[in-house]
Image: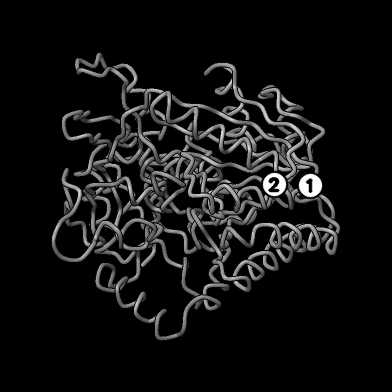
């Protein structure tokens, strides 16, 4: 059933006419996600301000069999927020309150539209009154943390700079309040670490909005450490940098963060206003954080520095202070946005590979770039092998976008071939669903579809995603 004038009137009654968009020009804002590769326009966008309003909107969609796409900041890079079949886009950006900071239980309860960084910002403002006043923060910190929402992070099970030590988003979620496709509200989990029965939070996290709409989350927060040391290393080849990553980890060292950037990425960052003093002559750099006691971090940093030098690093620097370290990390987190300084458009995949395969993967990515005639910038979470090859192209040139997509496809197939997967945090979404059969048998895919159908028997939640037709 289509969206009639009567349905629009009902939506306006629920959320208010100021929170409903039907104008064609205004709807254009919601027809693409952060990749800008494809577009699909919704019939209407609504902005609920509470779980109750979300529930009522979803109930209208359920009764009229209208497709629903929940959306946060729209930073998805896999087509996850595209309304492929039109319908209703439910924007959660007005549900942006930090509801509770519970230091005793080390949790923060927030609405889905809260920007990731706001959680740590709110914690930083607390006046801690504990024996060790180190402060707390939310450890799941994707590169988009300044703009991406907690709901979107959960939907795609986002990773982040610190995921090597603290895990991806699902590892830092304790509880979820969700609206089911029939409008019912349910709460799963709580403030405890483990609960009996099936891991429903784990099923919903990373399901890309195909099962339920997350409206609130209970997040795990962690305390800062006494000492954090940041190391910057520069290499004359990407292969040497990849080898250094494997050697650090095989030595039994587990940094809190271990990030890789190649020359194209570094030069893009340093060309803009976010430059952090990174070496522009390096073919690749590693940026590493270790944390703990002052004595412990000093010892661990010294071990890492020895490994970096023996792995071919021609420059290794320990940040003089947190100000310098923050400049380096702020530069790293602007890498995707900085691509505009070196190319008008880019496509990025996020295949994940076994860490020991990093040198081979980087070599093959370079070969694929040469094959298709594209520059490919590499910025990724080296600690867990989560690659982010940024394929630079110009959509104004006929056929370039299509060839860029072919190059991305080939890179993701290569990741699977060497023992990896097609996504580490961006999700399968719309762009990569044709590749999911590389990872799962028909039987396994049917199991997943059956799980989805338990939640969403009518198939109205974010249709056209994850599974090939």
Relative height, residue 305 to residue 426 (above, below): above
Q: Residue at the spot x=22%, y=43% of the render? A: 51
Where residue 166 appears, as percent x and y from the top left, is 39, 44
Q: Residue at the spot x=63%, y=37% of the render? A: 306
Q: Residue 241 got which mark? A: 2
Q: Nearer the viewer, residue 46 or 331?
A: 331
Relative height, residue 354 to residue 107 (above, below): below
Whole-angstrom CA distance, mark 1 to mark 2, is 7 Å
Relative height, residue 448 to residue 31 (above, below): below
Q: Which picture quadrant has residue 285?
A: top right
Q: Residue 237 got which mark? A: 1
Secondary-structure class at tag 2: helix
Secondary-structure class at tag 1: loop
Relative height, residue 440 to residue 50 (above, below): below
Q: Is residue 255 visible?
A: yes
Q: Is residue 343 visible?
A: no
Report crowding for label 2: few under 14, some 14 to 19, many 20 or more residues within 10 A (C-alpha): many
Q: Nearer the viewer, residue 279 or 435?
A: 279
């Amino acid at each position: 059933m289509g969206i009639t004038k009567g349905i629009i009137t009902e939506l306006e009654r629920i959320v208010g006419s100021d929170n409903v968009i039907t104008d064609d020009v205004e709807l254009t804002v919601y027809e693409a996600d952060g990749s800008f590769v494809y577009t699909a326009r919704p019939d209407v966008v609504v902005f609920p301000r509470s779980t109750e309003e979300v529930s009522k909107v979803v109930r209208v969609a359920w009764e009229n069999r209208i497709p629903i796409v929940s959306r946060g900041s729209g930073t998805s890079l896999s087509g996850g927020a595209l309304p492929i079949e039109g319908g209703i886009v439910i924007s959660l950006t007005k549900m942006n309150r930090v509801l509770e900071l519970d230091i005793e239980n080390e949790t923060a309860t927030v609405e889905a539209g809260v920007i990731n960084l706001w959680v740590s910002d709110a914690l930083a403002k607390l006046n801690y009154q504990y024996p060790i006043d180190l402060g707390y923060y939310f450890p799941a910190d994707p590169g988009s943390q300044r703009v991406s929402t907690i709901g979107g992070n959960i939907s795609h099970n986002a990773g982040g700079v610190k995921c090597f030590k603290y895990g991806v988003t699902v590892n830092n979620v304790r509880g979820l309040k969700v609206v089911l496709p029939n409008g019912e509200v349910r709460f799963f989990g709580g403030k405890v670490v483990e609960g009996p029965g099936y891991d429903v939070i784990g099923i919903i996290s990373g399901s890309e909005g195909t099962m339920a709409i997350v409206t609130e989350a209970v997040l795990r927060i962690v305390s800062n450490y006494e000492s954090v040391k940041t190391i910057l290393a520069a290499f004359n080849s990407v292969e040497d940098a990849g080898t250094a990553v494997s050697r650090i980890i095989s030595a039994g060292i587990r940094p809190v963060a271990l990030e890789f950037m190649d020359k194209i990425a570094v030069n893009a960052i340093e060309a803009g206003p976010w430059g952090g003093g990174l070496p522009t002559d390096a073919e690749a750099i590693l940026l590493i954080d270790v944390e703990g006691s002052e004595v412990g971090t000093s010892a661990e940093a010294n071990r890492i520095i020895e490994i970096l030098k023996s792995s071919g690093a021609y420059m290794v620097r320990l940040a003089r202070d947190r100000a310098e370290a923050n400049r380096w990390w702020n530069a790293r987190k602007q890498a995707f946005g900085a691509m505009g300084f070196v190319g008008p458009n880019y496509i990025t995949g996020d295949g994940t590979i076994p860490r020991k395969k990093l040198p081979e993967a980087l070599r093959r990515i370079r070969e694929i770039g040469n094959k298709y005639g594209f520059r490919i910038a590499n910025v990724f979470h080296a600690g867990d092998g989560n690659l982010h090859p940024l394929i630079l192209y110009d959509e104004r040139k006929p056929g370039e976008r299509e060839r860029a997509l072919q190059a991305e496809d080939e890179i993701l197939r290569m990741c699977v071939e060497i023992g990896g997967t097609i996504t580490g945090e961006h999700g399968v979404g719309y762009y990569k669903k044709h590749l999911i059969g590389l990872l799962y048998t028909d039987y396994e895919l049917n199991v997943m579809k059956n799980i989805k159908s338990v939640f969403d028997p009518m198939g109205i939640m974010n249709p056209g995603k994850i599974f090939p037709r």
